[in-house]
Each structure stands twice: as C-alpha cells, then as structure tokens.
Amino acid sequence: MDASDGRTGAGYLRDGVPTAVVRGFEVLLLWQSRANQRHALAHLDDRMLRDLGLSRAEAVWESRKPFWRA
C-alpha cells in the first residue's frame, strides 16, 4: 500500500476487494439475518403474534421457509 495513491487503511481494503466477494458476503449476512428472524418468529407467543398482525399459521409458514427464500 503506497500512501501516494490516496488509499489508506480500511478504505484501501474495501476498494481492493472484488465486487463479487463483497456481494457474496452481503448475501451471506442477509441469509443469516433471515434465519435468525425466522427462528425468533417461530418462538413468539400468540399475544406477540397478534401485536404483529400475524396468525400462528402465518408465523409457522414463514418460519419454515428456507433462509435463501425471501
């Protein structure tokens, strides 16, 4: 890393990483988030589901979807 090129620290690392790698990491983070949210949804009680406007059947259906499906 040469300081004369204007890229230093984290900015240099971010700019030096190929876009496909960054996008792949973002997709993995999205999938992990979906899995976590669906797990939490599956464990909500009926009162909490009512607050969200969801039935138990809707919560079960959503929580059983694979993490890669929106």
Image (spheres, rainbow, N blue to C red):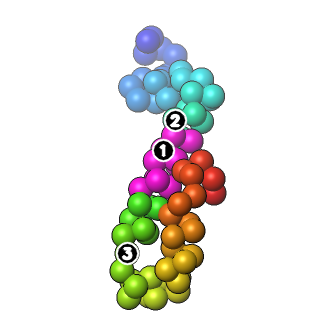
Which residue does the image show at 46% across and 24% down from the upper left?
Answer: 13
* Tag of residue 59: none
Quarter placement of the N terminus: top left
- The answer to whether mark 2 and mark 3 are in CB contact below 8 A is no
Task: Report the Cα–Cα distance between label 1 and label 3.
Answer: 23 Å
Q: Secondary structure at mark 1?
A: helix
Q: What is the three-letter code of the residue carrying label 1?
A: Leu
Nearer to me, 36 or 43? 43
Which span is picked out in magenta?
Answer: 27-36
Element at label 3: loop
Q: Position of residue 5 (x, y in %)?
A: 52, 16
Q: Position of residue 11 (x, y in %)?
A: 46, 30
Where residue 32 appears, as percent x and y from the top left, is 46, 47
Occupied quadrant, residue 10: top left
Location of mark 1 (residue):
29
**Amino acid type, residue under disc 3 in the picture:** Leu
Image height of 52 relative to 24, above or below: below
Q: Is residue 43 above or below residue 9?
A: below
Place residue 48 in its image quadrant. bottom left
Q: Identify the mark at residue 44; answer none if there is no mark.
A: 3
